[in-house]
Image (cartoon, grey):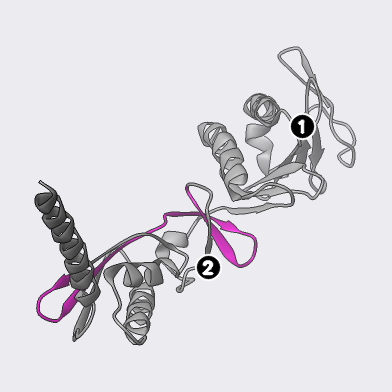
Amino acid sequence: MIRSIVMLVVLAVVLVAALRFVNALATVRLSTVRVAGELTNAEGEQVRRAVTSELAKPGWRTAADVADAVLGLGWVRDVRVRRQWPDILHVAVARETVAAQWGDDAWLTTGGNVVPAPADPRDPRLLGLPALQAGVSDGRRTMRVFDMLNGAAQAAGLHIVRLEESAGGDWTTTFADGSHVILGATDLRERFDRFVAVHEAVLRDAQSDVEHVDARYHTGVAVRWAGAARPPAGGDAAQPAVLRVGGMATR
């Protein structure tokens, strides 16, 4: 009985050692590295450089070592490494899905993770993405705020091109026509919905004349008109207009 147990322990140790040995040999004496995934040429070249740099290190390099090196690029979400005998290494890469520009030198993924700027700034996947910046919140919180507001904006035919949080925590959205809405730090969705109601009732046909809307009110919004534009009901264009929509005072 004891002999059988000892034999099983020895067999297990040998098996573990063999697996480690095979894994270590998985990335040595290679002549070809093949990269797969929806990557630009520049991104594919980054992956190849990371792989060859890792393989050039002294000692045996494992598939896990290569995967870690590729993940270290920052914009990679997942990587799978396998060897095709005798001398080909397959590296399958899935990149993070970029959803917005973050500050001046980074990007946000759909999950709000901050990733480095793409290798190719002309990548067509980056065209039309909004610019997000936050003085207090992290990337995930900022992405959640954007998603919350963007659905209502799209339903109203508005396109958010920028969302910015000040150092004091106040949020401002900017639209494709250059106008913007100041939402403040709290009740963001309620305030944005209030703006959308005013936009639908009064501002839709005059959106190009709107400089900005201030929604930091309990019951309405204040509208400042651009240049020589006049409020729909007349008045001083240099002062925020007082509008009434459905019995709700907006100022």
Instruction: Characterize the local packing of mark 1: few (<14), some (14-19) or many (20 or more) Cα atoms within 10 angstroms.
Output: many
Residue 1 in the image, given as x and y percentages of width and height: 10, 46
On residue 226, the disc is: none
- Residue at 45% across, 69% down: 72
Determine the CA span between mark 2 and mark 1. Answer: 33 Å
> In the figure, is residue 155 to the left or right of 242?
left
Image quarter hosting the C terminus? top right
- Residue at 33% across, 74% down: 44
Q: Give SS at disc 1.
A: loop
Q: Amino acid at mark 1?
A: Ala
Q: Is residue 133 above or below residue 202?
A: below
Residue picked out by circle 2: 117
Q: Earlier in the sequence, mark 2 or mark 1?
A: 2
> In the figure, is residue 172 to the left or right of 68?
right
Nearer to me, 184 or 1:
1
Nearer to me, 17 or 38:
17
- Residue at 47% across, 68% down: 118
Residue picked out by circle 1: 215
Magenta part of the chain: 82-110
Q: Are marks 2 and 1 in contact (CB under 8 Å)?
A: no
- Residue at 75% across, 12% down: 247
Res 218 seen here:
yes
Instruction: Characterize the local packing of mark 2: few (<14), some (14-19) or many (20 or more) Cα atoms within 10 angstroms.
Output: some
Res 210 seen here:
no
Q: How many marks?
A: 2
> In the figure, is residue 6 to the left or right of 163?
left
Residue 121 in the image, given as x and y percentages of width and height: 49, 71
Q: Amino acid at mark 2?
A: Ala
Q: Is residue 68 above or below residue 87?
A: above
